[in-house]
Image (spheres, grey):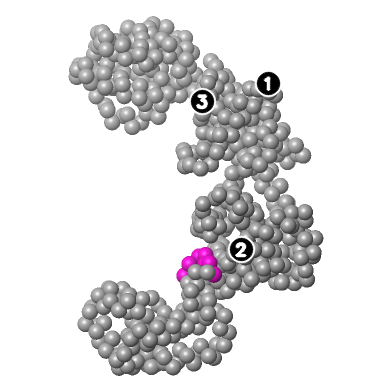
Amino acid sequence: MNNLDNEFILTLHDVIKRPLFQQARVIAGENGLQRRVRWVHVLEISNFASYALIHGEEMILTSGIGFHLGEDNVVHYMQKLIDLNVSCLCIEMGEYLQSIPDEMIDIANRNNFPLIIFPEMVRFVDITLDLHPLIINGQYKMLQNLESVSREFHRLSLTSQGTTDVLKLLHTSTQTQIIYLPLEGKPYVTPSMEHRAQHKLVNFLSDQVQVLMHQKTSPPPYSLKKEDKIILLQPVGAMGQTWAFIAMVSDQEPHEYHSLVIESASLSISQELLRQRYVEERKLHTENLWVDDLLHNRMEDDMQIKEFVGPDYKKWNEMSCRVCIIELEKPTNNAHNSSMDSIDLAGSHLSLIVRSVFKQHAFLPFITLKNNRLIVLALNLNEKTKEKSSDKERLQYVLSYIANLSMEKKLGDFQLFFGVGQTYVGFKKAHRSYEEAIKALSIRSQYKKSFIFYEDLGFFQLLIDLNEKNMLESFVHHHLGTLIEEDRVRGSDLLRTMKVYLENGGSKKQTADDLHIVRQSLYYRLEKIEEFLGKEFMSPENRLTIHLALYSYEFLYPNRFNV
């Protein structure tokens, strides 16, 4: 039996040495005897439905019943087994089959697919009783070894050299070449390699990593081939972020143990990196307290800002910047759980993600956490490059990605809302973008979007800046007061009808459809509106005034419209 790298592997070489196979003969496909046997399965040619039960690497036993159905069916049967990655086919000669068709032998030889015959009757149940305990016990021992190694991975991840110690143990437990590729920093190789070979292999893996980072693939670990080497590539990361890759390079085809142990090593390293990042993030929050003073315009002069920013001040001060505010909010039914401790924890968690994603899309983020708001001052690093996408397009992608994490519950029960200010150049003007981000966030209930850019608000910009609530209420009452009163007294829904009618450019059909009423009911409502607002209510001047009044009403009372 082959016990390679702590994994029990039963091959056909092993099987044909068992007592029950002493009379068996390999009549074709001898070059495939190194194939692994994971299970034993009885499958007759007439039972095509059993194909669905095959997962690969099974030994198939058959009595030959159904082979009389014709050579085409026999060939199809053989080819199907080969396509399903079956290990071999064992045929009992005698009652149903006296000879093997030449076509079957040819297919087996072409595909290195072992074809084994029993010249005399053999009980299939004896074969399964002999081989299945070997396979099950081998799997159990493999899992025991894996559990032992995984516990050691976890212990090592808590030491000062956690990552390197985990990688060394990964090499020892698999006897393969291990290469660790952080997305930021130098690769680590264990055991050491000849310099030229290492350089060549690392460059190849770096190129493959870039491909994997930008396309959707099957679940990891990913299998690659380079010349005579087989490579397993496992990402390292957490919270939807990838920080590194582990490559396991071998001369042999990897087995289940390899996939499980590299995944376990990845998990232990991810936990260590996550702890490090939490500590770094806390430190950065402390260091970035000056950002709060900057955004509230409490910095006296450029020299004071330069003192906090450091030697890169001049370069960064010439870049455009935006302020993005991310508000964490519990759903109403969970509001009692939103203690400051849980918000602080979720904010730190979110800050890790935000910093990583902003950097990946060419923004330099300065982050501060205040109450339930994460405030990001983002410098546009692509401003002086030939990057085609605007900072707004990239920022929209970033915010969509972060919003999806919230929807997938990766931040607990917190919902995220985003307000984004306009672009300004220079740290001293960042407070303007901050004030705009606050204003954008303040009307999210009216705007009904998870993230709002201040420059997209249109007329709402004027309403936000118009702080005289009495003036707005007077304007609304003067132009819409009669409709508001009629709706209040009679429940006639004229105000909403007017809003939908204007939004549809005066289209009666579309308005009736959107309101889910018949055309006659709409005509009646429009007659009532004309009675209250006058026959010229749809003239250009009156139409603009009424639309502004409706916007103002919605701004003052965001929950009144039930559209």
Marks 3, 2: nearer the viewer: 2
Name which residue type carries label 1.
Answer: Glu
Task: Determine the residue positioned at 58% across, 74% down.
Answer: 439
Quadrant for the C terminus, please.
Answer: bottom left
Q: Secondary structure at mark 1?
A: loop
What is the number of the mark on residue 38? none
Q: Is residue 449 magenta?
A: yes
Does residue 499 lie above or below 490 as drawn? Answer: above
Task: Report the Cα–Cα distance between label 3 and label 2.
Answer: 44 Å
Q: On the picture, is 346 further left or further right than 494?
A: right
**Residue matched to label 3:** 225
Q: Secondary structure at mark 3?
A: strand
Name which residue type carries label 2.
Answer: Arg
Q: Is residue 255 magenta?
A: no
> What residue range appears in magenta?
448-454
**Residue matched to label 1:** 194
Task: Report the Cα–Cα distance between label 3 and label 1.
Answer: 20 Å
Task: Determine the residue positioned at 53% across, 21% down.
Answer: 227
Residue 2 in sight? yes
**Quadrant in the rendering for residue 402:** bottom right
Q: Position of residue 540 (x, y in %)?
A: 35, 84
Q: Position of residue 146 (x, y in %)?
A: 60, 31
Task: Determine the residue positioned at 58% across, 67% down.
Answer: 422
Q: Classify 10 Å Cα crowding around label 1: few (below 14), some (14-19), many (20 and above).
A: few
Q: Position of residue 108 (x, y in %)?
A: 34, 14
Does residue 261 lie above or below 499 as drawn? Answer: above
**Residue matched to label 2:** 322
Q: Earlier in the sequence, mark 3 or mark 2?
A: 3
Q: Classify 10 Å Cα crowding around label 3: few (below 14), some (14-19), many (20 and above).
A: few
Q: Nearer the viewer, residue 414 or 193?
A: 193
Q: Earlier in the sequence, mark 3 or mark 1?
A: 1
Q: Earlier in the sequence, mark 2 or mark 1?
A: 1
